[in-house]
């Protein structure tokens, strides 16, 4: 599944450097709140002290997501997607 809150060039990808430093979300699922999508999952490699490895995290509004390529972009930055919960999309 590929999702874009606003239209992007079909070839657009997040910058490699951004994604190399991005936290990983495992056991993630998509949450729909009206027109907004969020991700909830278990975070690894977070630079934010509020979210140590193994903490559950719910993201802000997701701007773009590509499940097959394993990335999501929100207002706070990017996320690398690990294994989804129950196939991922529950919205």
Image (cartoon, rainbow, N blue to C red):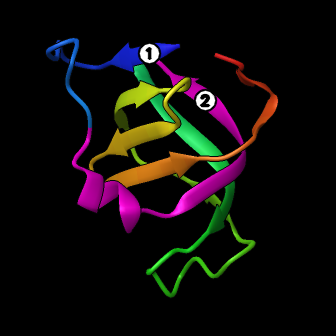
Residue at left offset 64%, top offset 45%: 40
Q: Residue 74: within the magenta?
A: no
Residue at 53% x, 13% y: name it: 1
Mark 1 or 2, nearer chain start: 1
Q: Which residue shows up at 53% across the image and 36% down it?
A: 70
Q: Which residue is mark 1?
A: 2
Can you give x and y, in whole percent of width and height, for residue 75 in the image? 27, 49
Label 2 environment density (alpha carbons within 10 Å; few <14, some 14–19, many ≥20) = some
Q: Position of residue 52 (x, y in %)?
A: 63, 82
What x and y, as percent, mark residue 17?
26, 61
Q: Is residue 36 left or right of residue 39?
A: left
What residue is at 61 percent from the left and 29 percent from the top? 30
Is residue 2 something that shows in the picture? yes
Outermost residue toward the right in this view: 86
Image depth: mark 1 or mark 2 in front:
1
> Front-most of 1 and 31?
1
Q: In this orientation, which residue lies closer to the viewer: 71 or 63?
A: 71
Say which mark, if any, is on residue 31: 2
- Residue 57, compared with residue 61, is above or below; it is below
Quarter of the image where one finds residue 39: top right
| Above or below for 28 versus 56 | above
15 drawn magenta: yes
Bounds of the magenta segment: 14-35
Pointers 1 and 2 in contact (C-beta within 8 Å): no
């Amino acid at each position: 599944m590929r999702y874009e809150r606003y239209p992007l060039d079909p070839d657009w990808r997040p910058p490699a450097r951004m994604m190399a430093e991005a936290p990983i979300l495992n056991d993630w699922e998509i949450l729909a709140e009206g027109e907004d999508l969020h991700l909830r999952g278990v975070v690894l490699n977070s630079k934010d002290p509020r979210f140590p490895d193994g903490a559950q995290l719910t993201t802000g509004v997701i701007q773009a997501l590509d499940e097959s390529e394993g990335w999501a972009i929100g207002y706070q930055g990017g996320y690398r997607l690990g294994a989804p919960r129950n196939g991922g999309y529950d919205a």
